[in-house]
Amino acid sequence: MFRRLPLALIAALLLSCTVRPVTGGGEEFEGDDEGECADGTDNDRDGFFDCDDQDCFGAPECQGDDDDSSADDDDATADNNNNTTNNDDATADGDDSFTPGLCEPFATLQCGDVLTNDTSGADATDAIDGYNCATWNESGPEITWSITPTSDVLLSLYLVAFGPHQLDLFVLEDTGSGCSEDDCIADGNDCLDDVPLSAGTTYYVVVDGFSGWEGPFELTVTCPP
């Protein structure tokens, strides 16, 4: 389902959007102080503790052998979901080498659209668990759209999740491999502003579920002049 949103309301929404902090900037996040990724405390009060919090995925204490009996290259979440270039099976024999996933767009986007959908519904796929532009665990289902602008534009996206679930935004460029997680050019939590798109090139907008989350959402698409 989609509808057109008045320009004044679009402007108000974009002014209010925020992006998940990756480093300081006045907001608390897990790991901004030494030792927080291994202290057993939910320091940023987002419901995720230590190495299960996306902000700790790159921390030294969240690396190493976390879910099997051998010294291999495990991921930080100990879920054996093979969403990074690791080999985290029980035998440490390297036989689960990473293969990039291919998302499947089910519809096209237009500037000014407002889309409502649900990553637990029929339009969702579950082909991608991580992206080369972010360290987040995106093991939830994803919904994908394609967009091929006829002129150079700056794409802005605003995402509202209807519920406690955490969803993230990604923009991928088709470089000849289709909708591939290896071709991510932008990522964000509830907002992406002014992502440059070139005329005649196909891009993919993906709403994906952080750490297995899924649920309903609304996505606003704008291309400011």
Image (spheres, grey):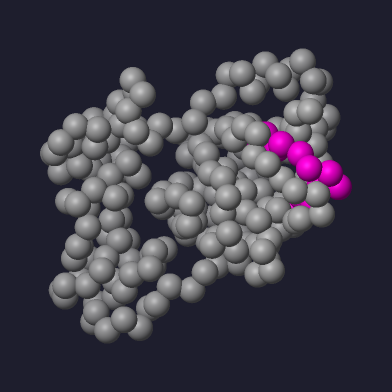
Magenta range: 146-157
User: Residue shown at 13%/38% (left/top)?
Assistant: 35
Q: Position of residue 106 (x, y in %)?
A: 74, 57
Check the image and name the residue furthest to the right: 150
* Count of numbered badges drawn on the protein: 0
User: Residue shown at 24%/48% (left/top)?
Assistant: 59
Relative to 86, is 127 on the left or the right? right
Q: Position of residue 154 (x, y in %)?
A: 71, 36
- The part of the image, by quadrant, that contains residue 197 is top right
Q: Is residue 86 magenta?
A: no
Q: Is residue 154 magenta?
A: yes
Q: Is residue 104 above or below residue 6?
A: below
Q: Quadrant of the C terminus?
A: top right
User: Residue shown at 28%/56% (left/top)?
Assistant: 76
User: Residue shown at 35%/83% (left/top)?
Assistant: 95
Relative to 191, is 29 on the left or the right? left
